[in-house]
Amino acid sequence: MEEYHEGKAKTISGFEMPDGENGRVAVLHFKTMKPGMDTSGNGYFWETAAPYHYLKDVKFADLMSSDKIRKRPLYFGAYKLDKIVRGQSVTWVPNKYYYKGQPKIKKIVASVVSPNSVAQSIKSGKFDVTGVLNSQWQNTKDAKGVNFIASVPLKYSYLGFKVGKWDAKKGENVMNPDAKMNNKSLRQAIAYAMNVDQVYARYSYGLSFRIPTLIPKGFGEYFDKNAKGYTYNLKKANEILDKAGYKKKGTYRVQPNGKPLTIYLAAMSGSSVQEPIIQNYIQQWKKIGLNVKLTTGRLIEFNSFYDKIQNDDPSVDMFLGAWGLSSEPSQADLYGRTAPMNYTRFASSENDKLLEDMDSQKAFNNAYRVKVFHEWQQYMLDQAYVVPVANSYSIVAVNKKITGYSLKPSKSMGNGFPNWYYVSLAK
């Protein structure tokens, strides 16, 4: 692949179809094998398929905007796209070519609903399947005629500190040693001042919860159960700042060089509780003498938020982001030196080594890989360039007339979605 992209080869080698183009077997040859290759979602090879016969005449640069992708896509799943009402709904109908046969539901309509009307939609039975907002659980939990299905997804929110920029020419993250947030003591103090447990007890009824590391419990033995994370401790936060030379001048602290310190936080808009949660954190940071203000003066819409984060907007010093994770726990794609999604732009030789070790040939020994993952978690906690904040239960309200709706691996599509082939609706 590398030789092809560099113009050194006219074809891509290492790909075989022993039974021909219409066969059922494809063989991939890799230059190096990785320990995560035996796990779904590893990123080393694509796990779905595209209809070559249908797309072969579309230029690669035009694929994203092509009607064959946007309006008339082909599917190999149980249902196919029937109609799109932009920004409102998508309608799916049975795919008569599905290899398992005809699914049981004649039509599925997925609709966009205002967050403010979710609870009422569930109570009124307007939809058969509805995602529950945790902040509305008290107004939802007593709804009649539904079953609630909960899971803990491979996701988490985090606080990231901008300490550099993405260098597109080099294809790597480059740290700025003089960045405002490139002070470990400052980052640690900010983390200790966050009353995460109190916040989610109040605003999510315990359905969101603080996480201690960047590896969720869902990864089993890779999760370091001994990691404590950053628990709320204003006294410790103040002591760290005092020791690091962030002296108070009036209400707020100044930098060790005596210059004023104002920290700009970027946070996304969202549910009705997002604003009070963010304002709470700003008040907590004020208690330790830190002057934190919102970038743009308000919460930022999702697309605008990530436009600023991805492009290293200088108006952002720290940001509250979130990840949806792959089922393979390797961290290189999120926090590596050459990872564009490493939005803090943090890079170090120690981090390079740990990330390399967790995906090395030696890591085929699972005990060794587990050990490296635990070391990496402790290292990242100490450095505090990315501070783990919270995860949440994902809850779905399902009409009691529905059968076959399951999140078991054998009956689901992963990522919290059922395999709709098995789902039916009683009359």
Image (cartoon, helix red, strand yellow):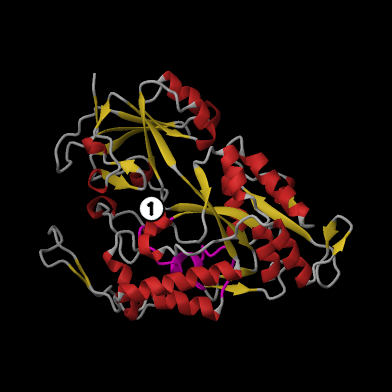
In the picture, measured across the screen, residue 311 lies left or right of residue 38, that is right
Q: Is 159 contained in the magenta span? A: no
In the foreground, 119 or 303? 119
Quadrant (top left/top right/bottom left/bottom right) for the C terminus: top left
In the foreground, 37 or 27? 37
- Looking at the image, residue 242 lies above or below residue 266: below
Q: Which residue is mark 1?
A: 63
**In the rendered structure, which amino acid carries the disc numbered 1?**
Leu
Query: Which residues are the magenta region?
Result: 325-347
Other-residue count near label 1 (Cα within 10 Å), few / some / many at <14 / 14–19 / ≥20: some
Q: Quadrant of residue 264?
A: bottom right
In the picture, measured across the screen, residue 403 lies left or right of residue 266, that is left
Label 1: which secondary element: loop
Q: Is 335 contained in the magenta span? A: yes
Name the spot of residue 218 as percent of width and height, x first: 39, 55
* Main secondary structure along the magenta-highlighted residues: loop
